[in-house]
Amino acid sequence: MKRITVLLVEDHTLVRQGLRLLIEADDDIEIVGEAKTGREAVKMNRELRPEIIVMDIAMPRLNGLQATRQILKAFPATKVLILSAHSDPEYVEQVVKAGALGYLIKQSSGEVVAKAIRELHNGKTFFTHAVAKRLKDGYQKSSDGIGLQRKSSTELTSREEELLQLIAEGHVNKQIASELGISIKTVEKHRQHLMEKLNIHDIAGLTRFAIASGIIESSVQSTIGEDAPSK
């Protein structure tokens, strides 16, 4: 029997190992790789070509949302199942727009995760009841002109969100240049443009915006920031 191939993407080792044990308890599913960041997920998807990616949202360097966009742009046939601690309609809506076909909260059981993987494999979508209800309620509120509004009216490009995440996590220009494969001068130019676009002119303000917009979580920022070298 041919097994469903899965790439597991989660930055917390203990959670990732637990998920692997739960998922591989089913003989028809095989974990072909594990990634700790969105950046690793993009690279490993290109190398391994899994059928399904089980993707965390809140990860350092490149979050799950941005990783999903990059992966599906390059490999549209890949099917992404998001795992998140959040069930807010805004989070779910952004994931759906990025092209993910499923969304589970992390409290889901191993049986539910395995079921979701099979559903995506069979060409269907899968949202837990709580997530589906919140998404439906959010769309209803949006049709009334209240809800599902981004925390800022300013829309950022995918590259701008990447840059903002790295800045908010405490990375300096040299690190960002290396991470994105661009020059330090280009980073400085993008950073200045981002600040002007958002009308925010300090790192603390950019960090608060990134947290409020769901680009990073406050716990991610504080963990990265503690180890970030000075400029």
Image (cartoon, rainbow, N blue to C red):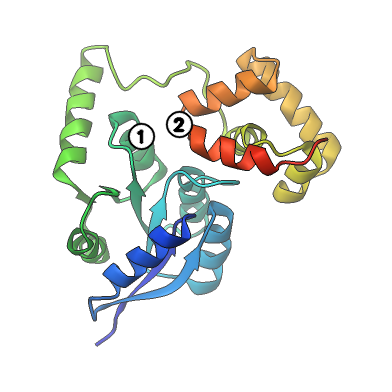
* Residue that carries the numbered disc 2 in the rendered image: 214
Q: Which amino acid lies under the numbered mark 1 shown in the image of this protein?
A: Tyr
Quadrant in the rendering for residue 111: bottom left
Screen quadrant of the N terminus: bottom left
Residue most extreme to the front = 226
Q: Which amino acid lies under the numbered mark 2 shown in the image of this protein?
A: Gly
Mark 2: secondary structure: loop
Residue at the image position 75 percent from the left and 23 percent from the top: 192
Up-down: is 127 above or below 71?
above
**Relative to 97, is 172 on the left or the right?**
right
| Location of residue 68 in the rendering, given as x and y in whole percent from the top left corner | 46, 50
Quadrant in the rendering for residue 86: top left
Residue at the image position 45 percent from the left and 31 percent from the top: 214
Q: Is residue 78 visible?
A: no
**Relative to 12, is 157 on the left or the right?**
right
Q: Sequence order check: which comes first, mark 1 or mark 2?
A: 1
Up-down: is 18 above or below 131?
below
Q: In this orientation, which residue lies closer to the viewer: 122 or 198?
A: 198
Up-down: is 217 above or below 101?
above
Residue at the image position 48 percent from the left and 35 percent from the top: 217
Q: In this orientation, which residue lies closer to the viewer: 45 or 83?
A: 83
Q: In this orientation, which residue lies closer to the viewer: 28 or 75?
A: 28
The Cα atoms of the two marked residues, 1 and 2, are separated by 7 Å
**Disc number for residue 113:** none
**Disc number for residue 91:** 1
Residue at the image position 52 percent from the left and 23 percent from the top: 155
Mark 1: secondary structure: helix
Q: How many residues crowd around disc 1 within 10 Å: few (fewer than 14), some, or many (20 or more)?
A: many
Screen quadrant of the C terminus: top right
Q: How many residues crowd around disc 2 within 10 Å: few (fewer than 14), some, or many (20 or more)?
A: some
Q: Please say if the residues under marks 1 and 2 sit with CB atoms less than 8 Å apart.
A: yes
